[in-house]
Amino acid sequence: MTWAPTNLTPGVAFIEMKDGTKMPDQNQRDRLNLYTRQGHLCGVFRQEKSVMDFLRRHGAPFWGGGGMNAQETLFTPDEVADLKLWSANILAPLRGEAQGYAKALTFAQASALHKLGLKPGPIIESGLVGVSQIEIAANETWSPSDHGPYYLTIAVNEAEAVTDIVAFAPDKPNEWFLRRGSAWALGMDHINGALAWPDTVVSLSATPLDWLRADMWGACVLDWTTDAIDTIRALQEIEVSSPKFAAALRLQLSKPPRLPEIAVSGDKKNAA
C-alpha cells in the first residue's frame, strides 16, 4: 500500500492479510523479513481493525468515518465488504462465545486453580480463561454441552481477534481440543513478532496449562500442522522450560516431510 510520503512517514507499507487457518508461506516470510530489515513497514494481520490501527499509527491518510467503509482510501469497496463479512461471520461469534465462558468462571473456581500453579487474579483479569461443559466430536473439536464434563477454556487470540478456543481438563493437561480447529497456537502475536524481528527468542510452552503458568507469555503449539512446523522451524531461537520438552520438540521438528510414491509412467507395462 502506498500514499504520499512526508517527513514523518515513508508512504509505503507491506500488508499481508490471512484468515484464521493460514500463515505466510516461506517466500512471504523471507520477503517480509527482508523488507523489515530494510526499514519498511510490514505486518501480517487477521483483523480489519488491527490493519487500520497499524496504518494510522504510521501516518497513513484517512478520511470519512472512523471505521472501515468505502470512503477509506486504502481498500477497494469489494475488499472492504469481504473483510467485514469475514469478521462478522467468523471472528465476532467466537469472541462473544469466549467472553461468555470467561464470565462463567467464578472466583472460587479460579482460586482452585492455585493448586495447579496458576494465579487467580491474572487469570480472571485476562478475560481469556473461562469454563464450559463440553462434548468432543469425532474430529476432536469440541462444542458446548449441558451434560458434558467441565473444561477450562482459553481464547486463542491473534492481532486482537479470537481465532479459536482451546479446552482442556485441569487433571489432563496433556490433552486438549479446539473449538473449530482453525488455529494452531496460543501466542501467535509472539510468533509473528519473532518472524518479523529474527533476534527475538520465542518462549514455547508444552501445554496450554504451562502457557497459563508462564503468565500467558510466549506461545504454545496446539496443533502440529504443516504451517505450524514450517513456521516454528523458521524461528531463530526457541526457549523451553524442560529437557524433556526440548527433546520432544527437536524430534517433532526433525521429522522428514512425507513424500508420495513416485512411479514412472509405463514401468508396469514394460515389466509385464
Image: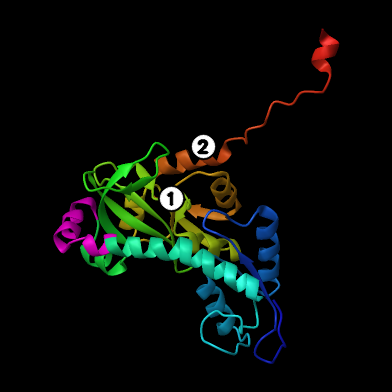
Q: Nearer the viewer, residue 226 or 204?
A: 226
Q: Are marks 1 and 2 in contact (CB under 8 Å)?
A: no
Q: Is residue 266 left or right of residue 261?
A: right
Residue 139 falls within the magenta-colored stretch? no
Q: Which residue is mark 2?
A: 251
Instruction: Specify whether residue 107 is painted magenta.
Output: yes
Residue range (magenta) = 101-117
State the image coordinates of residue 175 (x, y, percent, origin top left).
34, 41
Between residues 202 and 73, which one lies in front from this camera angle? 73
Closer to the observer: label 1 or label 2? 1
Image position of 163 (left or right of 235): left
Q: Residue furthest top?
A: 272
**Can residue 55 be seen from the camera position used here?**
yes
Q: Quadrant of residue 172?
A: top left
Residue 264 is marked as: none
Residue 156 is situated, as x and y percent measured from the top left of the image, at 41, 58
Left or right: residue 110 compared with residue 208: left
Secondary structure found at label 2: helix
On screen, residue 156 above or below 207: below
Mark linked to residue 180: 1
By secondary structure, the bulk of the magenta-drawn segment is best described as helix
Residue shown at 18%/52% (left/top)? Answer: 115
